[in-house]
Amino acid sequence: MTDPLNASLEKKNGYDYPGSPRSVGWTRPGRVLLADRTNPLPLDCGDSFYPVTVEYETYGRLSPAKDNAVFIIHALSGDAHAAGWDADWEKDNRPWRRDRPGWWDHMIGPGKAFDTDRYFVICANMLGSCYGTTGPWEINPASGKPYALSFPVVTVEDWVRLQVRLQDYLEIDRLLAVAGGSLGGQQALAWAINYPHRIRSAIVLAASARLGAQGLAFNAVGRQAIMNDPFFRDGNYYEGKPPAGGLELARKLGHITYLSNRSMEGKFGRRFQNGSKPCYRLDQEFSVESYLEHQGRSFVQRFDANSYLYMTRAMDYYDAAGAAGGDLNKACAGIGGDLLLIAYSSDWLYPPRETRTIARAMLANNRPVSFIEIPSDYGHDAFLLETDQTTPLIESFLKRCNR
């Protein structure tokens, strides 16, 4: 394997390199079969699905009492590689991991918010994704061909059900905390509601009890962009050219929802690509157009279009109060552990006012909850970027829960 980095360096471009005392270093994923013919995974759609293999990574050491485990849950386009540097990037054909660490590396590692000198941190890829856990790109043993759209529709609750199986595989009876942002935050909330006896606390960042109508609309248009691509072929594109144009457009639409108006104005405004005057053409004239083009093209290189369909639909379906007849107070009544809710002022995909409804439901049930709204111009992406503000909140919360 080609060593992509000089491990003697401690920091470059804002990243802690493998040789840094604040990095978890080189990482390799584990893969485990968690559902088979004798023990299929029950899904909300009514299917009993197998086989299911899960890719996961761990950082730090599990204490002898097994009471220091924290389960990190990724968002829509994330994966199990949450921290450190992928030692197998070349073997697994994941070149985008070569020059950057895991997606939450600023938060996971020695001395960081999720301090791996204190905690045993777990992160697993979600069912239906394209990063090692069973998804529509894999071969269906019944047909000998990729599942494509024969893959079952999955939900947030299905993902959590599978994560609990991983918890059992790791022989951890009760997690110190589950934590995630965005779609990961909704899974953390689902853990707290559906498996309160398996966790001591939950940390929910940039998420709410359900996605609003505007978010549903953006997801719907993104899926239509993919399915209307001439190369989509009802999802059966794995032996030919993929629907790159549709997926690229879907990512551009989605990325707009991750930013705030103020951050877009600050980054791009109405600046032209070349100079201060228009060129009177119909392709990319403005800086913001070039930025979205880059985001779309890079995403196509690392994500599967069918996975995008399935995962955004799971995001749409999630409603924390759904099983309680729409009553969020009732849904939160069984939550036993502490809840930390962190919202970001400019997030309009999961706005703070919606996160606050979870806090009110917890208070209505006399359950322990902390709600913090962090001022930020970054929009929804703030949970990935506002690490300086978020870190002390998580540090103090985990220390309190670990007493």
Image (cartoon, helix red, strand yellow):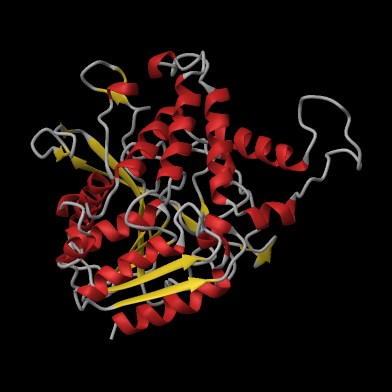
Residue 189 visible: yes
Q: Nearer the viewer, residue 19 or 356?
A: 356
- Residue 388 sits in which quadrant? bottom right
Up/down of 234 relative to 96, above or below = above
Q: Residue furthest bottom?
A: 403
Residue placed at 53% from the left, 39% from the top? 94
Residue placed at 50% from the left, 25% from the top? 225
Q: Residue 35 in the image: x percent, y percent?
A: 18, 40
Left or right for 8, reference 214? right
Q: Residue 283 in the image: x percent, y percent?
A: 76, 26
Up/down of 314 relative to 175, above or below = above
Left or right for 367, reference 123? left
Q: Residue furthest left?
A: 38
Residue 178 visible: no
Q: Nearer the viewer, residue 121 or 358?
A: 358
Image quarter (top left, top right, bottom left or bottom right) of the N terminus:
top right
- Residue 335 sits in which quadrant? bottom left
- Residue 266 sits in which quadrant? bottom right
Q: Residue 342 in the image: x percent, y percent?
A: 43, 69
Image quarter (top left, top right, bottom left or bottom right) of the C terminus:
bottom left
Looking at the image, how many numbered discs can be counted on the residues?
0
Residue placed at 18% from the left, 39% from the top? 44
Left or right for 96, reference 279? left
Q: Residue 12 in the image: x percent, y percent?
A: 69, 62
Q: Nearer the viewer, residue 401 or 210?
A: 210
Residue placed at 54% from the left, 47% from the top? 257
Left or right for 111, reference 313? right
